[in-house]
Image (tube, rainbow, N blue to C red):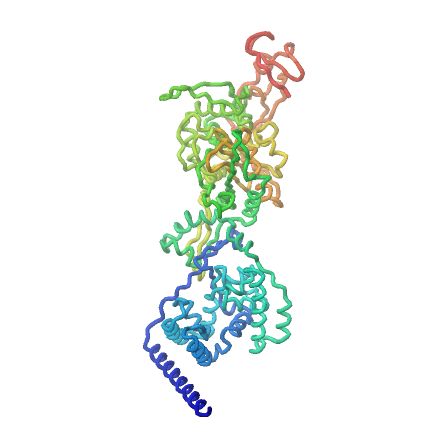
Amino acid sequence: MRQFTRYFLICLVVLFLLLLGAVGLLAATVAGMGDLPPEETPLTSTFYDRNGNVISTRFEQNRFVIRLEDLPAYVPRAFIAIEDHRFYDHFGLDIQALLRALFRNLQEGRVVEGGSTITQQLARNLFLTHERTWKRKLQEALLTLQLERKYSKNEILEKYLNTIYFGHSAYGIEAAARTYFNKPAAELTLAEAALLAGIPRGPAYYSPYLGEQAGEAAKRRQEAVLSRMVEEGFISAQDKETALKQELVYSGREALQASRQFAAYFIDYLINHEIMDKLSGYTDDPLVIYRGGLHIYTTLDKKMQQVAEEVFADPAALPETIINDEGEEVPLQAALVALDPEDGSVLALVGGRDFSKSQVNRAITRRSPGSSFKLFTYAAALENGYTAATVRDSAPVSYHIPGTDEPYEPSEYGERFFGKLRLREAIARSSNVIAVKINDELGPEKTQEMARRLGIESEVEPVLANPLGTAVVTPLEMAAAYAVFANQGIKVEPRFITKITDANGRVLYEAGPPQRREVLDPRIAYLLTDMMKGVTAPGGTASSLGPLLERIIAAKTGTSQNHRDSFMVGYTPELVTAVWVGNDDNKSLGWGQTGAVRAGQVWVRFVNGALRGEPVTDFTRPPGLSEILICPETGLLHNPRCSHEPVRELFIPGTEPAVRCSWPECPYCPPEPEWNWNEGWWYNRPGDGVNTPGWRLRNRQ
């Protein structure tokens, strides 16, 4: 027995000497080696809203770099205690741990225990795979010694804390703190730090997100970490007991997934259309978004975006399905764009109900805007001498279109006709016939040119029907174009990004002040705004929305042919919003599913919520407008003898009516002796006498 013991001790000494010799050889080898391989540590890119709040991240590996000095002292000490308590004493390789691992591995005939130091783990994380072979262990040892030669202990510890894996795509202590506790690592408590320190040994076993059994294992591991910290003198026994009593509040996997879905369509738009264009002088590699640790500062308003996404999830505003006239169950989709008319900042953008189910961004998908396109025709009309008091008849009309066999005969919604209307009324009631007649009088090229001037980049054909939405456009385009009206004729291009910096804070892109260009007379812009107020007033196409509104708005609804698309575009002085509701398969939503009924519900709920708590303001009237009394039937100057109550109307000087309503000869103001009352109905005549052909029944109420 004594002889065996002596031989065993001799073997130990020989092994120890061999190990020392190997280490010496390694050291000599390292001294003659060149630089370390380049470090491959992809960093997470972070997106911020306009107030500096984090809204989302994108990554290949979810990782953020944090400095050691920015962490509470107990955070790195927790990892040292459980992973490598002799970290500050060894040269990268812990001989005692290596011997222990060596005998264990010899017994098993394979590598089952690593005995790895923090520096060895860093070498593996930075440069190697995680296979357990002798070759990989030798490479690891060489790289470990190189790291120790190149960096200080604190630099190694900082790199280690920024690279270790915690499960659930979280690399590094900062990502882990956000993933598990929804807070930065600098704010971790001792209890939270101890729990996180226990996870890297086995994320699949110690993640509290993996069920009750894993949660219990994580708590036991946390206690082991705290015990080791007491043994190393890092904390007191009382500190340990206090930490164990702290209730840990996790972010939750659902919240984690929800945070990655927040503003998903907006972020997707930036990735596909904005970021690389802004980085053209820096890189052309799109992977920089996922690996470069960029800080991307956007125009998004987090509160408004939250309101928008909540509205989309509210079945009262946006049902999942509706039954159309054919009895089909039609799934509803929607899009919303909201921007600041003053500087073009896109404040909220939703491209669909659920990005995880459909990545089609409907905020930039072309659909028919219906009657919301009429405002471009009316803008052109006001620019060419028409006024809000100009009267046109909505009586049926027929046009011969060269090259076609059938005449074009525009009709009103529901096949009803309104008679003679002022343009103000035509907008409120959304008269199709009058819009087409005005377009014909102007020449369709005028509507086409106005749409392009205000920001419609999609193709617009110069056809008679284009006020009715024959061109297909995007909600983003419509919001940008209507912003010109809200901004008193000033056009500002939509913008999404204000600044981009790299991981070290170096500015790669910074937006200048918005380019402002007057494209419409501010008086015309205001007249259109004032006229659109009638859309939600009694008698307007969206009068049902009026009682729901919490502030002063100007808006126009739109419904495409066969009720496939429902639009509402409008604004307050500080916010322009375009909403589309429809179906991805272009199925009809059914009779009555108008812009007010479908898109309007989303629009009103969003605008009310987005601006709740903000002062209610009215639109500012620019100088250079006159206000006079007119006859509401003729649009002419009010005649004191006219039986109709006069109304006030706004005019650009020089466009006011020059003559008065000619009572009693005015065809719309019949002589008093010939009033014909019948339960609130009255007749007005084009000729002489009650039985003359051409009498029309009018509702006076």
Q: Please state the horizontal and vertical placement of residue 587, each as a whole percent of the image.
A: 48, 33
The relative height of residue 212 versus residue 325 in the rendered view (above or below) is below
How far from the left and from the top, in percent, is residue 316?
60, 39
Q: Nearer the viewer, residue 86 or 514?
A: 86
Q: Is residue 467 visible?
A: yes
Expressed as whole percent of the image width and height from the top left, the position of residue 629 reads: 59, 24
Front one among 574 and 365 = 365
> Which residue occupies the foreground of this view, 101 or 567?
101
Residue furthest to the right in view is 679
Task: Examine the rendered structure and indicate whether residue 31 appears above or below residue 332.
Answer: below
Left or right: residue 7 versus residue 607 is left
Q: Quadrant of residue 111?
A: bottom left
Residue depicted at x 54% and y 42%: 575
What residue sits 57% from the left and 27% below the top? Answer: 649
On screen, residue 571 above or below 133: above
Q: Residue at x 52, y 29 (%)?
A: 326
Residue sitting farthest toward the bottom: 2
The spot of residue 346 in percent (x, y) is: 49, 45
The residue under the point 44% across, 44% down is 515
Image quadrant containing the C terminus: top right
